[in-house]
Amino acid sequence: MIIVVGILALFVIILVAKGIVVVRQAETMIIERLGRYHRTLVSGINVIVPIVDRARAIDWRFVRTDPKGTPVYLHTKTERIDLRETVYDFPRQGVITRDNVTIEINALLYFQLVDPMKVVYEIANLPDAVQKLTQTTLRNVIGELDLDETLTSRDTINTKLRIILDEATHKWGVKVNRVELQDILPPRDVQEAMEKQMRAEREKRATILNAEASRNSAILESEGQRQSLINNADGSRQSQVLMAQGQAEARERVAQAEAAAIRSVAAAVADLKGDPTQYLIAVRYIEAIKEMASGGNKVVFMPFEAGGVMGSLGALKELWKHTS
């Protein structure tokens, strides 16, 4: 009797233990009663009826890394549905562009389960469905683009993939948040051709830059020479102007001095009742003879019309007599 009571007590304890389900934060469980949907558990302590109520398991995928660093994809079944954002790293696959170039692409998909009931009852194997849908959608999107557009339009491809996948997975209770293309690898021969093209473009840009630098240098040098010539010409002009002004001023002052001297001589000669004109002619004549004699010439030529000059000398002689 005691054994039976003990067995019954143990059975009750097991049933009570199985009837209490603790759900962690950001997780949920789908409970079926006698094979039909009953309710969705929330985080915290939940009470179910053992044997009658059972949790529905779903297919899920985990990624593990082996000792060599290679990712290993593990498929399993779980009764607990993770409501956090999940990332799927899809293996590399070959796709064909619009210009018939086969490239290899691997992508990352960030999604979140927003309706656990649809996740369980609307799709049989969610990880495989999401993977196949992503692969086929990626082929369709890449098939509409050329190789150059594919390599330069990652943001456009990511946005287009996210919109298409979000619309397709909405009925499965899935929200696709982001899609990221990791690597886009063209064939080896295409990579070599692209490298040659890139090298040629760089050499072309370098040649253009060198030509522009040489042209700018020649322009600056010619402008410098031009400005130097202009400055030299301006300086020479200003120097000549200043020299001419100096000579003119000197001549003017010499002329003013000579005029003052002539006026003084004329006044003095007039006071002595002589002819200032003859006096001046005689003085100039004597200075000219002195210059001719100082040249070292033995022969001195006298002008033909020397009578007037001799008369001036006579007047000068008379003037000296008066002064003495």
Image: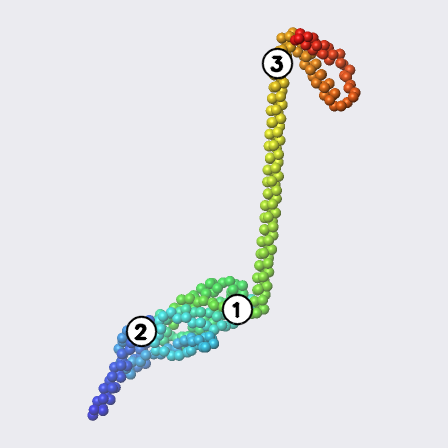
Q: How many marks?
A: 3
Give the amino acid type for the residue marked by disc 3 in the picture: Ser
Q: CA distance from mark 2 to mark 3?
A: 132 Å
Give the amino acid type for the residue marked by disc 2 in the picture: Arg
Q: Give how far across and how far down residue 238 sits, in percent.
A: 60, 32
Q: Residue at x 59, y 57 (%)?
A: 204
Residue tagged 2: 24
Q: SS for tag 2?
A: loop
* Residue 185: numbered disc: 1
* Residue 85: numbered disc: none
Farthest bottom residue?
Answer: 1
Q: Give how far across and how far down residue 137 sits, in percent.
A: 47, 69
Is 175 displayed left or right of 135 in the figure? left
Q: Give how far across and how far down residue 296 sits, in percent.
A: 76, 23
Q: Are marks 2 and 3 in contact (CB under 8 Å)?
A: no
Q: SS for tag 3?
A: helix
* Residue 264: numbered disc: 3
Q: Give how far across and how far down residue 222 sits, in percent.
A: 61, 44
| Earlier residue among tags 1 and 3 | 1
Q: Residue at x 75, y 12 (%)?
A: 307
Q: Where on the picture, by quarter, is residue 130?
A: bottom left
Q: CA distance from mark 1 to mark 2?
A: 42 Å
Farthest front residue?
Answer: 324
Farthest right residue?
Answer: 299
Q: SS for tag 1?
A: strand
Q: CA distance from mark 1 to mark 3?
A: 111 Å
